[in-house]
Image (cartoon, rainbow, N blue to C red):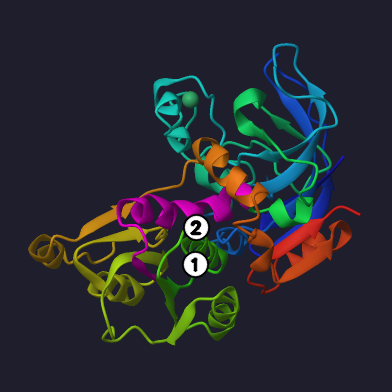
Amino acid sequence: MRQLTCSGPGRLEWRDVPEPRLASDDDAVVRPLAVARCDIDLPLTSGIFPIREPFALGHECVAEITALGDRVQGLEIGQRVVVAFQVSCGACRSCAVGHSANCDRYPVLSDFGMQPLSGVEYGGMLSDLARVPHAAAMLAPVSAKLDSVALASVSDNVLDGYRAVAPHLEDLPGSEVLIVTHGLKSVPLYAALAALALGAERVDFASNDDDVLEVAERLGARAIRTEFGKPERRYPIVVDAGLTAEGLTYAIRSTAPEGICQSVSFYPGGEMPMPLGRLYTLGIRFSIGRAHSVALLPEVMPLIEQGRLRPQDVTTRVVDWEDAPAAFVEPAIKLIIQRG
Ligand SMILES: [Zn+2]
Ligand SMILES: [Zn+2]
């Protein structure tokens, strides 16, 4: 079968690889139908994390089940599903409390399509087939009325944006929200979308990226063009989404006393400055960590099914499967690749 393979910085090609098969009675094999490019994929293919061997790409997708192990219940061959991007068992102590990003049974960062992070090749979703372990936990059925392309990013970037604001808007209903974007593309836009859907009184969107600001405005957020100097006001809920120390400092300085600054940033460069004295004095809570794909899917899917959250509003480019190698390394805020 064909697998989109990254063999070095910026080098992407289709390679012929053996078809995956069921390896346990709990497995499924799926055929990806629509795959979204994650905000981490371009840094990944650029070699920001060392590429030691060729690896499979793609980890956000909607797929069709083509084979199921004998023990898998509640799923059927032919069914369309969202595939959780983090490999997790659904049964260990971490999974039981919803910490599926850190399943006890797998090495840290065990994800599809991200071999340079974990060192383990789990396969990628830009392939004709992919094996999914613990299928009952990792596959979320998609209702027939929903479009695969619209849902392609739900397993990761959409739910990442959602969890950045949802628990905080539950604590402080109707609050004003500021999203600070300094390098990420789609996750902060999904956060704006979720904040508006969940009833934030006002959603402001601060960035130095004009293209992202334009989409934010189209979604209904108020765009603030900034180079991350002095913030103009403070907010009870602030989302930090980016890569730079200036952006992080701006996000923290924008957080009101006793407010929450939620970071969805992966900060690949190592150490970042953290003004702990300011956080202490003003009672600002700073929260950071990866989203939990399996645990969050049951919260996010109903919002989409009810039409309250429309991830397709963030999509800026859709290409055919054949065009994936070239399109995957070209700029676009949110790229989706669909099988013809
Ligand atoms: Zn991702
Ligand atoms: Zn687990």
Q: Amino acid at mark 2?
A: Gly
Could you tell me which secondary element the residue under label 2 belongs to? helix
The correct choice, above or below, for 81 with respect to 135 in the image is below
Could you tell me which secondary element the residue under label 1 belongs to? helix
Q: Position of residue 121 (x, y in %)?
A: 63, 37
Q: Which mark is residue 161?
A: 2
- Does the residue at mark 2 contact the one at mark 1 (Cβ under 8 Å)? yes
Q: Is residue 11 magenta?
A: no
Which residue is the site of mark 1?
192
The correct choice, above or below, for 126 with respect to 219 in the image is above
Quarter of the image that includes the N terminus:
top right
- Specify start and end residues of the magenta stretch as a single range: 154-179
> Which of marks 1 and 2 precedes in the sequence?
2
Q: CA distance from mark 2 to mark 1?
A: 8 Å
The correct choice, above or below, for 231 with respect to 310 in the image is below
How many numbered discs sit on the rendered protein?
Answer: 2
Q: Is residue 170 magenta?
A: yes
Q: Position of residue 38 (x, y in %)?
A: 61, 58
Q: Which mark is residue 73?
A: none
Q: Amino acid at mark 1?
A: Ala
